[in-house]
Amino acid sequence: MTEAQQTDRWIAHVDLDAFYASCEQRDNPEYRGRPVVVGALPGRRGVVAAASYEAREFGIRSAMPISDAYRRCPDAVYLRPDMRKYSQVSRQVFAVIKTITPVVEQASIDEAYLDISGLEKLLGPPAAIGQELKRRIHEATRLTASVGLGPNRLIAKLGSDYQKPDGLTVVRPDEVLDFLAPMPVTNLRGVGRRTSRHFDELGIRTVAELRAAAPGALEQKLGPRAAASFRRQADGIASDAVVPGRARKSISKERTFNEDVTDAIKLHDQLRELAAGVARIARRENLAGQVITLKIRFTGFETHTRQKKLPQATHDERVLLQTAWQLYTDSDLPRKAVRLIGVGISHWSDNSSQQADLFDSATEHANDDRLLDTIDNVTDRFGSGKLQLGVNRRQ
Ligand SMILES: [Mg+2]
């Protein structure tokens, strides 16, 4: 083996297609070929947890308010999530994945990263390994998965999303730049509403345009750290570390202000945005946590954290916001100018049936802001037309 070969990394990202909805179609033949929406039931508040590809043709997407989904397709099959079933299938999927390599990192209930570097001699080239992975998953579960293979996590993840459903995308190191160039910048990691707006203002839509952005412009708009991160991603540079057994212990988001903040309303607004982001990730990963953490840094890097344990696990941003704000206002913290504020959630509940109910309760008192958030989030994640491409190819 030459030295170049030794350093070649191949990371695979596996993602089951419309996982919850596909489980239901598998177990209920009468749902096959029909739009299936898993989540809250119509007439109640709540969101779509998963939509079958038939439902997606009506524009129905994950995280969309169920009322929107119903308006788009009243004839769809609407089902409550059966988390017990999905967890069981998930365990089967992961058992199969581990027959390929033990170097597997679970990213969510239906997503994993694998380090398949050096497996070529055993299993053939990356494309063959990806194919074999899909075959074994289908054999064991009768479900389809999409697989992306590339030199790092970013490329593997974008690859698995590239030709869904039932897709296989291999991006060799020398193809990375061309693969990324036409992609919307919103496909990159860490692009939320704020960043997305900043990219809009800079007239940057694609990764190619991001690469060509004037030196300084990006840095000024996004701050040096974020700008550097996006420039690295645009060049296809990302981590290739796959850590087996790594499971999220917490989810948190924080924001450093360009200028220290004393205005309570501004702090509260920022906290609301952070809480919404944390809650969104928690819901996506089917996690509900019992401990809320507030992090505050004052001018001069004096940093404090305060925690509160709730009687019940949550992934509701209103609870997150309320608790974190209370931690700030009720605590012994000095009233000083704030440089950084952050909120986190941890100590997961393992009661999956309780979590299933949270698809409803999370939005019971949803306000317009939150709905907008949801819609923006959907646009961020699915607005690129890639899924449409997948549907067309399947026909
Ligand atoms: Mg999936």
Image (spheres, rainbow, N blue to C red):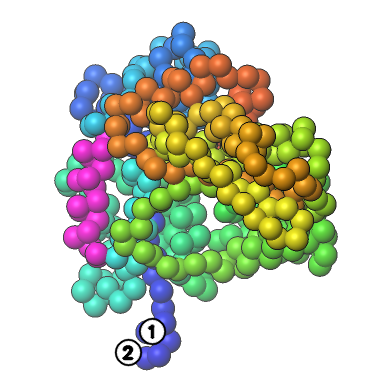
Residue 21 in the figure: left or right of residue 185: left
Q: Nearer the viewer, residue 251 or 189?
A: 251
- Residue 107 inside the magenta-drawn segment: no
10 Å crowding of disc 2: few (<14), some (14-19), many (20+): few
94 with respect to 248 (left or right): left
**Which residue is situated farthest in the front direction here?**
332
User: How many residues crowd around disc 1 within 10 Å: few (fewer than 14), some, or many (20 or more)?
Assistant: few
Question: Cβ–Cβ below 8 Å for labels 1 and 2?
Answer: yes
Q: Is mark 2 within 8 Å of ligand 1?
A: no
**As drawn, which residue projects farthest toward the left?**
140
Which residue is at the front of the view, 210 or 54?
210
The amino acid marked with disc number 2 is: Met
Residue labelled with disc 2: 1
In this rendering, would 129 be left or right of 384?
left
Q: Secondary structure at mark 1?
A: helix
Q: Residue furthest top?
A: 43
Q: Is residue 30 visible?
A: yes
Q: Secondary structure at mark 2?
A: loop
Task: Determine the residue positioned at 53% across, 66% down.
Answer: 238
Q: Amino acid at mark 1?
A: Gln
> Residue 17: x percent and y percent?
36, 40
Nearest the viewer among 102 and 51 is 102
- Residue at x-position 75% and y-position 61%: 300
- Left or right, 257 with respect to 62, comes to right
The location of residue 41, given as percent across then percent down, is 40, 14
Residue 94 included in the magenta stretch of the image:
yes
Could you tell me residue 252's position as x and y percent?
54, 47
Query: Residue 5 shows which numbered tag?
Result: 1
Q: Which residues are magenta?
A: 86-102
